[in-house]
Image (spheres, helix red, strand yellow):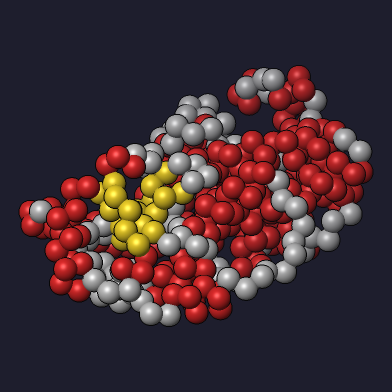
Amino acid sequence: MKADKEKMFAVPLTGLPTDDSVPFPLFLFLKKNDRMVPIRLPGDALGREKYEAFAAKQHLELWVPNDFQKLYLEYRERSGHPVADLAQAVAELNAPAPAAGKKSEEAVLVRDVLEDEELSTEEKAQVLSAVSQDLLRALNQITTRGDEARSEGLKRCKEIADEILAVAAQNSNIYDEILALRNSQEDIEHSVIVGTVAVMFGLSIGFTDEQMLGDLTIAAIFHDIGLVRVKPEVMAKKEADWSTADRKEYERHVLNSAEILKESGTDFHPRVFRMVEEHHENYDGSGFPKGLRGAQVDETSQVLHLANLFDRLCVGKQTGTSLSPADAFDYIYDLARDAGAVQEVRPELVERVFQFMQVEKESADELRAKAEGRVEKAMKKV
């Protein structure tokens, strides 16, 4: 939420226990974007790991809403005591990090915010919107300028992939998170949404290797870069109005994307190229450019395809009508269960993703109800 310090008061980190619960909520103030980020609900413990992380980054105060001032004072009177080894924690955890190359302004902003604390959905959308603008500039550098600019653009894209992965991999309810991000009023570029959603889908079916998830994000960023080599008059038309020749011209963007990556000379993992080349291959063999079928299409490529399909449905490119995120999910799920429909993604993969999201949604609803109950109970004591 937007910072309003008049409605909050600061409390010293040293006056908070690491393992005991506190009867008031805690917020972290993010200077870079002038926001208060909720850290803990009433009844939660701060936790030693979180305490040390804040100490290392010199976040030596947290914030509490004014409504909880009485509870805070009563708590301090009963049990307030500083943690003795704060100085040692700062010394140990604040050791100099290895020197790194200069990052783009937006990438630095995102990294700092992510390291500060887990983000709300609203803040994630704002982060991804900022990343989108940086990505568009970087892709422009890669496709329209000289070797030096191309190298810098590729470097930025790798940084951006790291930030997208960090946003997508934060603990959250995947179903609610995806719906909220796509419903956000923030301007988030298609490739950024696809990368974020693809990582979430990957996590939901058991992808745990960070390098694989990173490659999935890279592939999402670049999956449509080949559109810059498609005739502008084709891209200016609605897909429903394309002639056979127009569609063939559009379909070339897949191999164009892979070619642009290869021409860059960057050392991408082979699966990045494969995902880019296969993100329009359908499970039933009706896709393009090679008409691969079934197990010929890599599972990571199918995850990217599923994320791309979801966003195309949301923006109306798939059916000609924009669907809400919830309706897009229903469309994909119903399609997977219809034996007579075009099967773009392996039905079993869709089932695995959706089962996971359903379980998470039910769990999140239960946790949300408990949290609301705790807040209501705490407020009655004020």
Can the viewer see residue 202 in this picture? yes
**Which x, y percent locates residue 8?**
29, 46
In the rendered view, tell whether residue 345 sits above or below residue 250: below
Residue 68 in the figure: left or right of residue 138 = left
Q: Quadrant of the N terminus?
A: top left
In the rendered view, tell whether residue 343 sits above or below residue 247: below
**Which residue reaches farthest right?**
147
Q: How many labels sit on residues?
A: 0
The image quarter in which residue 198 lies: bottom right
The image quarter in which residue 210 lies: bottom right
Which residue is more in the foreground, 161 or 263?
161
Can the viewer see residue 198 in this picture? no
Which residue is more in the foreground, 24 or 214?
24
The residue under the point 45% across, 32% down is: 185
The residue under the point 20% across, 74% down is: 79
**Which x, y percent locates residue 55?**
47, 68
**Which residue reaches farthest left?**
380
The residue under the point 28% across, 62% down is: 363
**Which x, y percent locates residue 365?**
25, 56
The residue under the point 80% across, 25% down is: 231
Residue 231 in the figure: left or right of residue 89 = right
